[in-house]
Amino acid sequence: MGRKNKGTKILQPSIRKESPPAKQSENRKSKPEPLAGETAGVSFDKKDAVICSLLILVFFFPGIWNMGSLNTPRSGWTPVQINESFYIDFKNEYTVDYVYLFQGNLPKIDYKIYSGSPNNWSLLYNLSKENFVLSWSGIPVNSTTRYLRFVAASPGGELDEIVMYTGNYKKIPISKDSIVCESDNCNTGNRSLSNLVDEQNNIEDPPSYLTGAIFDEIYFARTAYEHLMHERPFEYTHPPLGKLLIASGILIFGLNAFGWRIVPLIFGAIMIPVMYIFGKRMFNTRFGGFSCAFLIAFESMHFVLSRIAMIDVILSTFMLLMFYFFYMYYRGEFFKQGWKNAYTPLLLSGIFFGLAISVKLTALFGAIAVMVLFLLLKRDELKKAERLRKNFFKPFLLTPLFFMFISFVVISFFIYALSYTPIMGIPGEGSGLSMVLRYSQNMLTYHETLTATHPFSSPWWSWIFMIKPVWIYNLSNPFENTVSNIVAIGNPAIWWASIPFLFFAAWRWVKEKDSTARFITVAFLLQLLPYLFIGRVLFLYHMFLNVPFMIFAIVYGLNILWYKDNKYKYMVVAYFAAVVLLFVYFYPLLSAYPVSSQFTNAHRWLSSWIF
């Protein structure tokens, strides 16, 4: 806290309109007097801990169930020269319907697949895929044959496992001596063709997301592993911290689907108690805390993004903590927490901003929202200071601005630069600040010049209406007439319901000068509107940063209804029931649970919902 001017009390910044100013005793002049009001705050007790624990369990166990396997193929074979080849002898003739190849951690596979017999081959399929690492490629063969031949069209195409199926996904048995090398050096050095069939019993039938990377995991899981190996990172379009955290799961559990997905799931679970504490503090009721945590626990996109190796949930957790500590400064509640320094919340907020921007640069949008809220707070405090004839500029503007600069610029940049430490020292990558700036410039250039299109992209204004969900994963099983999907889509009872509540919060800010409504509205708008100026391809999951504030807006209204009249409590309970029912209704499309095509079609509520 800044030093007092002689004869002037240093005032505690807080703007909540609803509560009267707290009285200060004459013998405690060192404590700041609130300018625009102070709330008592709500402590976190054992009952809160029990509620949070139950909600975490409700989220975590369905989340970890069938999230990923520990048995992702690891041993493999890599051709070292062009046209290196081998064939597989099944010993008997089979109708081979599908061949599944698992691409290892090298960037490209390029193989020609033949059927027939030795010295009499017919080309069946030309497989060429780049950057789909750690993932399965399913190839429809539909050929009756005893032999299948594989020819490497280029060196370096690592294969970690080959699985083949006849009708009804019945696995064709392949032994190690079934693979015949046609080149001179197929089994030289550390290479062995037997590695291609040594993990057959660990693979589900058919191979799925349980043992392979999906969607953008091919970038994030791969780069996380490269950080562990101290190799040049393949994915550089986002800062390293998110991938380093994913790498911690790989370090503990190995390079497998479970290992690269467990950390996002943990962060998804952490969001629940953070939302509870934030909501209870924001609305000063246990109901407010419970409602916020309950809604995030049953939010569909939160569930999906917590189960795949992407960095959005990690980013959102850090951003939520950034906003939480700034909110404590915004409301002046640090004083009731017994903190000696009024600016400790600003420092903590800046630290979490540093962690967030070290995951993804879009954290900057939230920092802009914090700065705007800070300036609005200072405007209110200036008016109050003039009314009370208090000194404003040094204790309430200059000193807080200094702490904002230290926390949101100096400390956050230090954290950001520190996140590049694993890259420093890699041959050819350089080190120090110049390397950090070079990577940052390359990152910005990539996003500024990206012209790629995508069938599931959508404009920012459409996100809250969920016009275009993101179809992340699909696997059809024609023999069982089922389909498995993972769709990044929000819970309609939360996303669509938030629209009127957001308007209500904005109205309360403008008409009632409500500080909580202002906080929610400004944070929501300033994390959304910057996308207006971004020309690159965008997706619905970019809206996820705003999901907590959509929930805050909903709970802002529900909290009023809950305490207004008992008859409204039935409406609130019915709304919570609708949230759960819709989550359960869409659950198969969030978790890749096999269902019929008719079931999937029934969930396409809009013609633009493609999955």
Image (tube, rainbow, N blue to C red):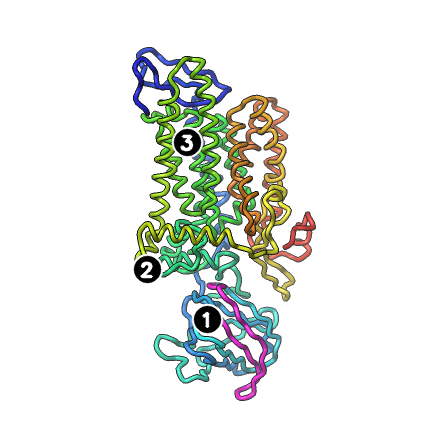
Quadrant where the C terminus lies?
bottom right
The amino acid at mark 2 is: Ile
Name the residue at the bottom extreme.
119
Residue at the image position 49 percent from the left and 70 percent from the top? 109
Indicate the position of residue 330 as horizontal and vertical percent values.
Answer: 44, 27
The amino acid at mark 1 is: Leu
Check if residue 123 falls in the magenta segment. yes
Q: Alpha-carbon distance for marks 2 and 3?
A: 49 Å
Query: On residue 441, which mark appears?
Result: none
Determine if residue 273 is in view.
no
Q: Which residues are magenta?
A: 109-134
Q: Is residue 599 above or below residue 42?
A: below
The overriding secondary structure of the stretch rendered in magenta is strand
Q: Secondary structure at mark 1?
A: strand
Determine if residue 158 is in view.
yes
Residue closer to the observer: 304 or 450: 450
Indicate the position of residue 528 as horizontal and vertical percent values.
Answer: 55, 40
Identify the residue position indicated by label 3 in the image.
46
Which badge, 2 or 1, is on the more N-terminal residue? Answer: 1
Q: Secondary structure at mark 3?
A: helix
Q: Alpha-carbon distance for marks 2 and 1?
A: 26 Å
Residue at the image position 61 percent from the left and 37 percent from the top? 577
Indicate the position of residue 311 as horizontal and vertical percent values.
Answer: 46, 49
Q: Secondary structure at mark 2?
A: loop
Label 1 crowding class (10 Å Cα cut-off): few <14, some 14-19, many 20+?
many
The amino acid at mark 3 is: Lys
- The reply to whether the C-beta atoms of the residues labelled 3 and 1 are less than 8 Å apart is no
Identify the residue position indicated by label 1 in the image.
159
Quadrant where the N terminus lies?
top left
Check if residue 77 falls in the magenta segment. no
Identify the residue position indicated by label 2 in the image.
426
